[in-house]
Amino acid sequence: MESPKPRVAAVSYLNSVPLVWGLTQGPQKGLADVSFCLPAECADRLRAGTADIGLIPVIEAARQNLPAVPGTGIACEGEVRSILLFAKTPWQAVRRVAVDKGSRTSVMLTRIILRERFGIEPELLVMRPQLAPMLAEADAALLIGDAALRVQPERHPYEYLDLGAAWKELTGLPMVFARWAGPHLPPDAQALFDGSWHYGEERLPEIIDHQADRRGLPRSLVREYLNRHIRFTIGPRELQGLETYLNLAATLEPALTL
């Protein structure tokens, strides 16, 4: 009897498109039942049993004690551009941070950066990712993914941090945001996702044109983002950065499974 296709929950943001290009457009198409949602919802689908594998926040993989598929994911080394923290007060005066409901790794990263760099542990307020309403309710606001890409941070009157750059400054290491993970990974999971990524990697110019039109973003921004800011391969340095992140996260959330 043929095994059922794995139910794959993929992230709907621009940064995941090269990873799933083979699954949606290439030789891996039809090998999995792929659906798209926010990173936090990918994790929730795994917890609920409505997905078998998800591109989930690394903090959620630790919380759910889920094995990850080696090889690919979403990472950066230095400026990431799509994870921006704005503040309307001096950083040390931030008491409340409005955070994007779609994010969990970046919310924990925000807590780590604010504590390690500024010595503060503010209250968090979950909101829709719109900068003006967020800053009307809080001292600082976290935008991730496409919502952050649509903002030109230097044009706003607020202080801001690119959290990829802030992490590199703090640790000297890459930052890993999401990995493929699931409770019962099939033996061919790495081959499936590696193949999909390599198909996308070979077609990045096509993806850039397609996604710039589809998402209404400047081609120059999409090109720089996918070629320079995002890393899709999780190697030894990325794993070192991930271990450092989870160790720091555990000091704020002791129940984490490391």
Image (cartoon, rainbow, N blue to C red):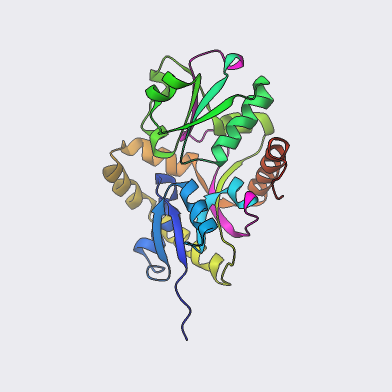
* Up-down relation of residue 166 to residue 54 (above or below): above
Percent x, y of residue 116: 68, 26
The residue at the point 62 percent across, 25 percent down is 114
* Up-down relation of residue 49 to residue 110 (above or below): below
The residue at the point 43 percent across, 68 percent down is 32
Percent x, y of residue 219: 32, 39
Judged left or right of residue 250, residue 99 is left
The residue at the point 31 percent across, 36 percent down is 218
The residue at the point 56 percent across, 61 percent down is 182
Q: Which residues are magenta?
A: 63-92
In this view of the protein, can residue 201 be seen by the observer?
Answer: no
Residue 89 lies within the magenta run: yes
Percent x, y of residue 73: 54, 52
Residue 41 lies within the magenta run: no
Toward which corner of the image does residue 36 lie, by quadrant?
Answer: bottom left
| Depth order, front residue of 14/138 | 138
Judged left or right of residue 128, residue 182 is right
Judged left or right of residue 28, residue 255 is right
Outermost residue, front direction? 48
Toward which corner of the image does residue 118 lie, by quadrant?
Answer: top right
Percent x, y of residue 191: 53, 68
* Up-down relation of residue 186 to residue 40 (above or below): below
* Up-down relation of residue 225 to residue 8 (above or below): above
In this view of the protein, can residue 162 be seen by the observer?
Answer: yes
Toward which corner of the image does residue 91 lie, by quadrant?
Answer: top right
| Depth order, front residue of 173/1 | 1
| Depth order, front residue of 138/39 | 138
